[in-house]
Image (cartoon, rainbow, N blue to C red):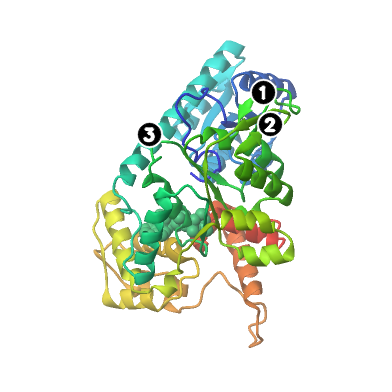
Amino acid sequence: MTSAVAHAFNPPQLEAANLLNLVIVDDERAIRDVCREVAQSLGFNTMVAESAEHTYRLIDSQPIDVVLLDLKLPGAGGLEALHKIKQRRPDAEIVVVTGYATVQSAVQAMKNGAYDYVTKPFTIDELKLLLERVAAHLRLKTENRMLREKIKSKLGFGSIVGHAPEMERLYRMIAKAAVSSHPVLILGESGTGKEIVARSIHFSGPFRDKPFIPVDCGSLVPTLIESELFGYVKGAFTGAVQAKEGLLAMAEGGTVFLDEIGELPVDLQAKLLRAIQEKEIRQVGSTKRTTINVRILAATNRDLEVAVAQGTFRRDLYFRLNVLNLRIPALRERRQDIPVLAMYFLERMAREFGQPRTLSDDAVKALLAYDWPGNVRELENCLHRACAMNSGPEIQVADLPGPITGRSSTTVVDGDGSDKIIPISELERKTILNTITQLNGDKLLAARLLGIGKTTLYRKLKEYEIQA
Ligand SMILES: Nc1ncnc2c1ncn2[C@@H]1O[C@H](COP(=O)(O)OP(=O)(O)OP(=O)(O)O)[C@@H](O)[C@H]1O
Ligand SMILES: [Mg+2]
């Protein structure tokens, strides 16, 4: 689950629907309005869409937990929309709305992964019950996840693999960082493991029983970040029918992990700095300040010093966050960990799918020779793909993706085939564009196949001004 909020380990005492993001998809305005009112009264953060296309755009740009989907949509059929939403957000729960005459399609929708359905016309009470049920279900899912995280954390650094001297040094720093309460800035290229390092710091520290709340500053819509982080009071803006606690307050006693901190808009950087310095926050729409007690961990794959020099990142905030600084080495800087990590991922897959696999010597050599620009995440994806390509017990070089074995990649097509020198950024832009086009716009899958995180992909789309 990658939405900024869906990651969050909400303390169980929260309102059922608090912080859950719901999209209402219906082409009839009156229905959208009623659903919105009911959902907001339960504490949902609501968004509306009148078509399938509009829904995809919302889903691609916002964290979404629940979709209320009318199966009778103009254009794309409801079932097709259901399929596409599930593809983009496998963790989101979808409730379908259908007419009495077409209950059959609701049954089909449930078979295709919908959580539940409601038939039109429905009463407000029916809708309320249904939404409350989804909210309770999502909360349970989150709690289970939190339990699993806790169990994992008992293994210490069990989930971080690697014996290279740089990694041993990193483990010592994590252990030190875990017992301190200062902010930590975690640096590393995309896919090096910044998030698992942040989790290790929290879950091996004294406040491991308190919440760990990751906030993906890169995937949140800038205008929403402030209200997500600081919360808001009732009536703070249109749609704020109920006060909402911010993530900084929710993490009370625990940790907030600000991922992709380099993407935080400058005005919010000032507000965040104040919150860290004064240990106080002010909810949007309120004049009252409340004290907070949270540990801040931040991560970025950008060079913040450059951003500071360019004036896009505040120097004072940079110094504040940089009290402790952990740099995770790129995978190509610790090649001896490549086979170790590869075996770890294969064992994990064997446990999951019940089919043990090893690597041929030549395959190991190929993995060792490759530069891994997408780091550990790319290695993990590469092995997933290799396992999918191979049904035997040993993975061969031929099962590895083209770029790793030096075979030409099919995704990069350079126009005229001449020997002219092409800037790497141009190759990257083309690769991204081609991949997304080949996958019919499926950005989540594109990010996976390209071996980069979703947020990294969105940042690059912005950077290269790709309208995909
Ligand atoms: N040392 C490691 N041992 C085991 N798994 C790892 C290690 N490093 C990374 N991973 C795995 O690789 C994937 C990427 O890690 P993570 O999400 O923490 O990276 P990241 O630096 O936050 O990437 P991004 O910048 O793309 O968000 C995850 O599935 C993680 O579990
Ligand atoms: Mg990350």
The residue tagged 3 is 144
Image point (69%, 56%), residue name: 314
| Cβ atoms under marks 3 and 2 closer than 8 Å | no
Cβ–Cβ under 8 Å for marks 1 and 3: no
Residue 404 percent coordinates (x, y):
43, 74
Q: Secondary structure at mark 1?
A: helix
Q: Which residue is the extreme one toward the bottom?
A: 419
Q: Position of residue 120 (x, y in %)?
A: 60, 17
| Occupied quadrant, residue 459 | bottom right
- Give the residue pinned by disc 1: 36
Judged from the image, the secondary structure of the residue bearing numbered disc 2 is strand
- Residue at x 53%, y 33% (from the top left corner): 250
Mark with earlier residue (1, 3): 1
Residue at left 76%, top 27%?
238
Q: How many residues crowd mark 3 within 10 Å: few (<14), some (14–19), many (20+)?
A: few
Q: Quadrant of the C terminus?
A: bottom right
Q: Is 335 left, or right, of 122 in this rendering? A: left
Instruction: Name the N-terminal-most of marks 2 and 1.
Output: 1
Identify the image quadrant of residue 161.
bottom left
Q: Estimate the x, y position of residue 330 in percent, counting from the top left.
A: 46, 69
Return the x and y of residue 165 as percentages of the image width and height: 35, 71
Pointer 2 residue: 48
